[in-house]
Each structure stands twice: as C-alpha cells, then as structure tokens.
Image (spheres, rainbow, N blue to C red):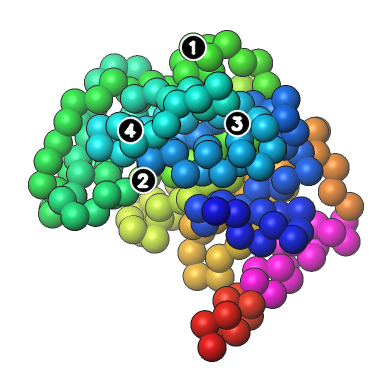
Amino acid sequence: MIEHKNSDLWVIQAHTIYSPAIKDSAVVVDFGASDGVFSEAISGATGCHCYAVEASPMNFAEIVASDRIDKFHYAISGSDGHVEFSTVEGYKHRGTLVLPVDATSTAVVQSKSLETFFKEIDVDEVDLLKIDIEGAEIEMFRSTTDETLSKIKQITIEFHDFIDPSTKSDVDGIIHRLETLGFLSISFNRKNRCDVLFLNSRYIKVSVPVFIYYKYVLKYVRGIHRIFSRL
C-alpha cells in the first residue's frame, strides 16, 4: 500500500508525502478519499488520525470508519451548499463536479469549502492535506485565505490541468501563491502535475542539498526504478 517506504518520501496511491513529519499525533485530511485506501495506509503506518472526505456515494460507502478514520460524504469545492456530482459506470474512482460527456449517473452532494470543513472538525493546524478532487481544487484554493493555508504543514495534490489545459494558468497561480506563503514545491512527474508536494518551511525544515535532490533528481531515480521493475 505504501511505495518507496525506504526513504523519507513515501508514495501512497500516487501521492508523495514527507513521512518524518507524520507522527501518531498528526492530523491528516484526505480530500478525495475514494474508497479510503490512502487514509487506511497512512493511519496504519503512523497511527495518525485521518478525516476522509469523499463525494462519490459508491466510493464513500466503501470507506471503513475506525478509531483513526472519520469519514464524511461531502464534495469539497469553493463554497458551501449542494452540487451535482457525476460518475461514469465502470470507473469506480472516476467522478467530477463538471459533467463529463460519458457520465452515466449523477447525485446531489453537500459541498463544503476547505475553511468550513476545518471548522467542522475543529482543527487549528493540519499536518498533511491530501487533495485529489478532480479539478475542484482551483475553486477550493480561491476561497481559502492565506492565513488558513499557512497553518497546513504539508500538502500533496493531484492537479488536473492535464485533463483541462485551459486551467494551466490557474494551477501556475496556485503554485506561485503557496511558494509566496513559504511552501517549498516539488513535482514528481515529468510530463504533468499529478503528484506535487508542498512543504511549509515554517514547520518542516529540509536542508538545501536534500531539497535539491528531492526536486531535481528523485523523480528520475524513481522513473528508472519503475522501468527496471517492469523488465
């Protein structure tokens, strides 16, 4: 369930995290939790507490709540209310707030902004925020204040500008904003931004040589490993 656990940077469900900063007292928020595999893996490995948020009714039903995992049937977006969530038959993990041409079913789901959800679970600081919400991250960031973002210690995110190239400038703006707030950004994909890690330098201290290795070398080392593992 956890790839590359032999280094400080773990990969869980294609999301890279900085593991030394996740202790058993950590608060992890999992936006786009799917069937809960990410939350199960990281809580099982570290003992942290996870808040798993999923919009798809089918995926949400498969999340197993426990003393370390609380689950919420919400769609994270830029505002509070209700949204129409669309799914595609035969693709368990595929769903979106934007109606796809091949959508086969829709459901009305309660929507929450990031700040509203943080208030609901009554947390002041978040050790890890994982985001995989099929493009809704753009509106989510727009509605979130700098003050709230600055209280998140690390963010691992799948951006979706590879699906909608028109959002590339929006993603560029999000990355620039987080860097301005003191986050160090590291993209682990060569061709897109499906796995980007942000480390808040106010909380997480990484030496310059280590950061350079993470940002400019590690993605290629992992790529070579993947190639040889297929041989």
Amino acid on which the number 2 mark rests in the picture: Glu
Amino acid on which the number 3 mark rests in the picture: Val
Badge nearest the viewer, 1 or 3: 3
Q: Identify the residue position indicated by label 1 in the image.
A: 120
Do labels 1 and 4 touch, CB within 8 Å? no
For the point 52% across and 56% down, which residue is it? 14
For the point 39% across and 34% down, which residue is it? 63
Q: Position of residue 53 (x, y in %)?
A: 42, 29
Q: Identify the residue position indicated by label 2 in the image.
A: 134
Q: Earlier in the sequence, mark 2 or mark 1?
A: 1
Residue 221 on the magenta span: yes
Q: Earlier in the sequence, mark 3 or mark 2?
A: 3
Question: Which mark identifies residue 96?
Answer: none
Q: Which residues are the magenta region?
A: 208-222
Position above or below: 145 against 215: above
Secondary structure that dominates the magenta span: helix
Q: Identify the residue position indicated by label 4 in the image.
A: 60
For the point 57% across and 80% down, which residue is it? 229
Badge nearest the viewer, 4 or 2: 4
Q: Identify the residue position indicated by label 3 in the image.
A: 28
Q: Earlier in the sequence, mark 4 or mark 2?
A: 4
Amino acid on which the number 4 mark rests in the picture: Phe
**Between marks 1 and 3, how big is the CA–CA gap?**
14 Å
